[in-house]
Amino acid sequence: MKHIVKILTLLVAITAFWIGLLETSILPRSYTWLLPIYFIITLGCYGLLMVGVGLIQFRTCPEEAVLLQKDVIEAREFLKQKGVDVGSD
Amino acid sequence: MDELHQQKETNKYSIIIPTYNERLNVALIVYLVFKHLKDVDFEIIVVDDGSPDGTQDIVKQLQKVYGENRILLRARPRKLGLGTAYIHGLKHASGNFVVIMDADLSHHPKYLPNFIRKQAETGASIVTGTRYVNGGGVHGWNLMRKLTSRGANVLAQTFLWPGVSDLTGSFRLYKRSVLEDVINSCVSKGYVFQMEMIVRASRKGYHIEEVPITFVDRVYGSSKLGGSEIVEYLKGLVYLLVTT
């Protein structure tokens, strides 16, 4: 099954559930009408939260750049000795 | 541990590196691969797309130092795209595992032993490098770039459920047969191609494991990323939604 079908199926199921709620009036109708808006707001908040958490946990590693520079110097030294043309770039 | 050792002895790893104008970087990366993969059987396959800067001359010099059986130069006449570069390299690969990595040193060869160890421990079909987990990270990205990257990732995680944390990273180890299987069903270009590969592999039910990597933005040479990246990414996302 294509992924888009899965997502649409999920949406249809949620919509059916919502219509069910509307029809049976388990909750007051005025509440039920607002549920889709809550759903979208929740989804948006979830997205923002995930981006925020991801951003906080996203490590910057300047030390890796320093290590890489060391590796570059070491590599150039070795390759120059072996006659590989790594001179001026 | 014994089993790990034995696997190291019998497995061969073909490292495919597509290049275009990377004369210095390709030399550095070859040195670093040999430094970090001491007792592993491997070969490096450089797929050069007719670089005018003499990348191929450097590769030939490297062959003299390290041996023509360890470094294979499999050039193509002109720029023909990343996906076909891997297919081209794959044709000449003799290993039962294939590693693909970028030539610009944003993928450091020191992580190769981690990929190999992870594969041996888990028996995974694919081991993919991730910047987004503990131990991973980036250097040389400003806040905007990080924000875009995370936003793009959350979008993909929410809509695609790919089962891996880093979709666009391209530092990966594949079982050869798995790469052959997956690569032929992929049609995207650029880094959407990397995303397509991992999503299709995930949908086919292959066992995918992750190892943390750090990503240092390119040191030498200019970045090849264009301005329409975000549009391409969104198109790729929609494409994968309807085709996988």
Image (tube, grey):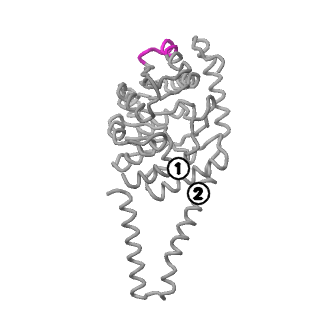
* In the depicted structure, whether residue B41 falls above or below residue A79: below
Asked if the stretch drawn in magenta spans residue B93, the answer is: no
Q: Is residue B38 visible?
A: yes
Specify the quadrant that holds the C terminus of chain A. Answer: top right
Label 1, residues with CA under 10 Å away: few <14, some 14-19, many ≥20: few
CA separation in Å, label 1 and label 2: 19 Å
Mark on residue A51?
Answer: 2
Task: Residue at 57% x, 54% y: name it.
Answer: B151
On what subunit does the disc labeled 1 rest?
Answer: B
Asked if the stretch drawn in magenta spans residue B61, the answer is: yes
Relative placement, left or right, of B220 versus A18 is right
- Give the residue at mark 1: B231
Give coordinates of residue A69: x percent, y percent: 66, 29
Specify the quadrant that holds the N terminus of chain A. Answer: bottom left
Look at the numbered disc 1 and give the secondary structure of its residue.
Answer: helix
* In the depicted structure, whether residue B142 falls above or below residue A46: above
Chief secondary structure of the magenta span? helix
Look at the numbered disc 2 and give the secondary structure of its residue.
Answer: helix
Residue B106 image-quadrant placement:
top right
